[in-house]
Amino acid sequence: MIIIIDMKIKILLFLLVLLQSNLICQKIYGRFSGMPNQLFSVEVYNGVDAKTVINCTTNDKGEFEFSHSGAGIEVGYLKVENSKSFLILLNIEDVEIAGISLYEPQSCYLVKGEQNILMQRFSKDNTERSIAIDALKYLNGYYKVRSKEIDSPITDISIGEELNRLLNEEYFSFYTLPSDGFLYWYFTMKKLVNIAILEARIHENNCKPMIEKFRRIYYADERLFRSGLLKEVIESQFYLIENSALPVDTLIKQMEISIDTMLAHLEVNESKYNEVVSFLFELFEEHSLNSASEYLALRTLKSGGCSINDDLASKLQVYQFMKTGDIAPNLIIGSSYSISNAKNKQIPKSLSDFSSDYTLVVFGASWCPKCAHEIPQLIEVYQQRKNQKFEIVFISLDTDKAAFESFTHEFPFLSICDFKKWETQAASDYKVTRTPMLFLLDKNRKIVLKPNSISMLKDWLANNLK
């Protein structure tokens, strides 16, 4: 028995040594002359959110030293409260940093750490070059327009030459980085994120090539989760799609393709899958991308691959009901509702009593900033479409009668409120989780669209109401 126990201990010790042999113990030294006795931290990412792994205080001379162990390269964010982060590569080499203060980032530099020095130098050069390229692109376009306006050519040869030179320099600068190394991958991702917004503005009619680049990313890549770039990469892809000049149906389809591509990669890892699904759902909800939220929820809940945790499942299950194609509940407009501008109007008793081919049911409130901006835009939509058998019903989640009447007094369409906020029966029946929330119903109360914006609604009406 003693021999067996002794053997188990030896095996455990062997496994422990084997595990530790894969970890790199990295020393990080620093001296910030203007930061004596200052508390700072190091944050790392393992997905969307950062966590603090080290808290340290400088001595009277602003010096500090700490160790960090890990098995793979990750990006660390050295920071103090209200300062910009100083990026360092962790689990790769010993590092020494010097400077006056993290509050003066231009004073900070690396004394030791070959890969870290290369990272900082490349980042600085690339950032400055990108600013110059964007400025020259603007000037190039500006002078071309000016030439047409004054009917006199303004030379853009020197601007064009410098722009081409910088673009070539940027292209070849990547060859200074080992193509199979972390830095090459990291800065390729950073560049993709940085140009996404510019591409959406300049090439809104042809964003597909850039969207395809995002789809070719392997979303289960450990580097993506450890670099702090996961959130930016996901947001950039859907920003491109959302802001591309695509018809509504095509835009929705493109979002579905990106969701499918991303989740197909992540089904090999349950924890990564849950984290990304949760982040996507929050992103779509924040941007009122109702169709994307619905598609994500139904796809995830029906998936036979990764299981999802209970909290996430409860959020997604809202979209099992009131999805596109479902029959919406019949809204009863009875004495329990206060009706704005009801004088001399014949008010239908229920939603089924409307004679319109399409009815837009809108949930909102005066206290909702987005509602205050978007819902008044429906006045114009209603005036343009009311003769085409199109109606609007606004259901307010206000709790104050004066606020409700003040908000709705100019609305030419039916506006009702029972002052119960989220406890309003209609809000419960329609599974309302945010404001504004819009449902476009046909004459049979079938949900044909859940527009995430007034522009999406206008686009659909323009294509379907003639």
Image: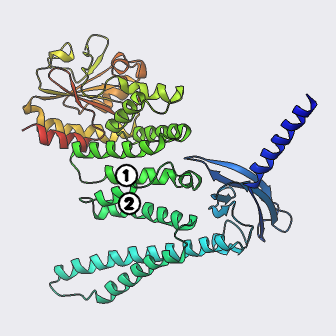
Quarter location, residue 113:
bottom right
Q: Is residue 70 visible?
A: yes
Residue at 39% across / 31% down in the picture? 297
Picture disc at residue 239: 1
Quarter location, residue 349:
top left
Q: Depth check: give the residue in front, 329 or 252.
A: 252
Give the image location of residue 230, x and y in percent: 51, 51
Question: Which numbered disc, 2 or 1, marks the residue that appears first in the sequence?
Answer: 2
Which image quarter is the C terminus in?
top left
Quarter location, residue 295:
top left
Q: Are marks 2 and 1 in contact (CB under 8 Å)?
A: yes
- Badge 1 local density, few (<14 within 10 Å), some, or many (20+)? some
Please give the residue where the numbered disc 2 appears in the rendered image: 197
- Badge 2 local density, few (<14 within 10 Å), some, or many (20+)? some
| Three-letter amino acid code at the position of disc 2 | Ile
Residue at 66% across / 53% down in the picture? 43
| Three-letter amino acid code at the position of disc 1 | Tyr
Instruction: Compute the Cα span from label 2 to label 1.
Output: 8 Å
- Report helix, strand or loop for mark 2: helix
